[in-house]
Structure formats: C-alpha cells, structure tokens
Amino acid sequence: MDLGVSGKTALVLGAGGGLGSAIASALAREGARIALGDIDPAAVDRTAEAIRGGGHTALPLVWDFADLSVTEARVGQIEAELGPVDILVNNTGGPPPTQASGQPSDLWAKHFQSMVLSVIALTDRVLPGMRARKWGRIITSTSSGVVAPIPNLGISNALRLSLVGWSKTLAREVGGDGVTTNIVLPGRIATARISFLDEQKAKREKRSVEAVAAESTGSIPLGRYGRPEEYGDVVAFLASERASYLTGSVIRIDGGLIASI
C-alpha cells in the first residue's frame, strides 16, 4: 500500500528512544524526509545513521523540548534543510514513577512544561503552514494510563490526559483545513522505558524483574510485549494519505491490554 507520504517532511520527537526511533524509521521507509529531535545526542545520531543507512534522509537535532526558547530556531532549521513540516509526531519522555498525592508543585510544573506546553508550542508553530497547504498530520503519543490510570504513575496519568483533551479539541478546529490530529496509546511495548518501569516495580514489591514481566505479559491477550516496529507502523499509517478521514481519535496499540471498551 502506498501511504502517500513520499517527499513530505516529518518531525519526530523523542526520536532517540525506542518508540520514536521506530516511528521515524517507518516514515522514512515510506519516503518521508525525517527531522529527528531528542535531548540525547548519541541516541538521535544512532537513529539518523540507521535511517541514512537505508538510503533515506534524516536530520538529527539535539533538542530539549522543555526549553521553549529554541523551538523557533529548530523548526527554522528544519524548514531550511528539509522543507516545511507536514507530519508532526509529538513523543516526549515520561516523568519518574510517583504517587498522585504529595508531589511538590515545582515537579508538576517541570513536567507540565516538558510534556504538555512543549507539545502545544511546537504544534502551534507548524500548524499555520499545514493549514495553508491544506494538508497536515499531528500525532501525539501518550500512554495507556490516559484510559486506565497506571498505579504509581500519577504525574504521567494526569499530564498525558490533558493532551487527549487538547488533541480532540484541536481536531475540530483544523479538520476543515485538511489537518488531522490523533492520539496513540502504547501498551506494553518492549522499550527501555518499559524495562525501567518493570525494574522499579520489582524493587517496590521486592520481586524479580522476570516475575513482574511475566505478570504483565499474562494480562495481555496477545501474550507478549509489543515490538517498537509494530507501534511505528500504526503511526505511519495515521500519518498517511490513506488515513485522511481519521481524526480526533484515540488509537490503542496495546495487544488488547486495556480492558475497557
């Protein structure tokens, strides 16, 4: 299937991590020019090298998303080197495990800046061009915690849920201009982040990591953690011309993990 994104410019945030790298690679295979943003220079360079090794275009950018003062410069560089952003994949790192109660206000503010305001500011920067060209895709990766809150991820559950309300509202505002905006929810995808969360749970409960992982996979109907590539392929479809009538939605990529309808 031709996804119709060849020659378009995609910006993928968090592109040095497992999910971001898989998303960027999936879009690159479809012929998109890829701008890669990540705070970790070595990680974003690895993703860029892998994409270039496949004969595709990649522009790595060291980018602290919480620093809103650099947004204009980074987007300007992308526009100068690759062209205006047609596809934006908002994928930010998650906060540390915490309870919902008893957290200092400055911790809430710090992660609100990096996880929510950064996404809104960047989207606002590229959205006028998308609307003018009558084509755009905004895809925001959050967490299954926005549907079924995950114990001990209080900050993540709350802040990521705010992005769901924002995305749904935005979909109505920009749909008439050919811009779609959707949310994707990873379940238990085999990334470093999931390994970290399994390790933290094992420490809290004084169990082995293997026991925690076995318990997790036992709750997934498909009986395994997802592969990052499976996540990336779904995002690539949402970014495509083929998904032009899909907007304002929340897509679960979870192997059936979330029990609610």
Image (cartoon, grey):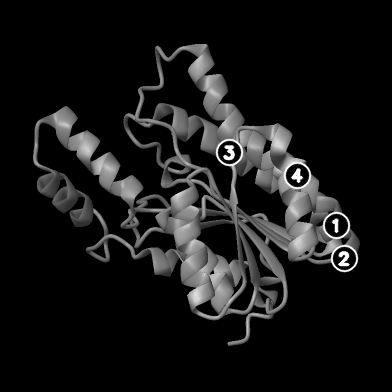
Q: Residues within 10 Å of mark 4 (few under 14, many from 20)?
A: few
Q: Amino acid at mark 1?
A: Gly
Q: Please tell me which residue is depicted at 54% across the width and 65% down the height of the picture.
A: 24
Q: Amino acid at mark 3?
A: Asp
The residues tagged by marks 4 and 2 sit, at their Cα atoms, a distance apart of 22 Å
Total marks placed: 4
Q: Nearer the viewer, mark 3 or mark 2?
A: 3
| Secondary structure type for disc 4 | helix
Locate residue 1: give its quadrant.
Answer: bottom right
The location of residue 258, given as percent across then percent down, is 37, 51
The residues tagged by marks 1 and 2 sit, at their Cα atoms, a distance apart of 6 Å
Q: Which residue is mark 2?
A: 133
Q: Which residue is mark 3?
A: 64
Q: Nearer the viewer, mark 1 or mark 4?
A: 4
Q: Nearer the viewer, mark 1 or mark 3?
A: 3
Q: Which residue is mark 1?
A: 129
The residues tagged by marks 4 and 3 sit, at their Cα atoms, a distance apart of 12 Å
Locate residue 224: give its quadrant.
Answer: bottom left
The location of residue 47, given as percent across then percent down, is 47, 62
Q: Which residue is mark 4?
A: 73
Locate residue 150: give its quadrant.
Answer: top left
The location of residue 50, given as percent across then percent down, is 46, 70
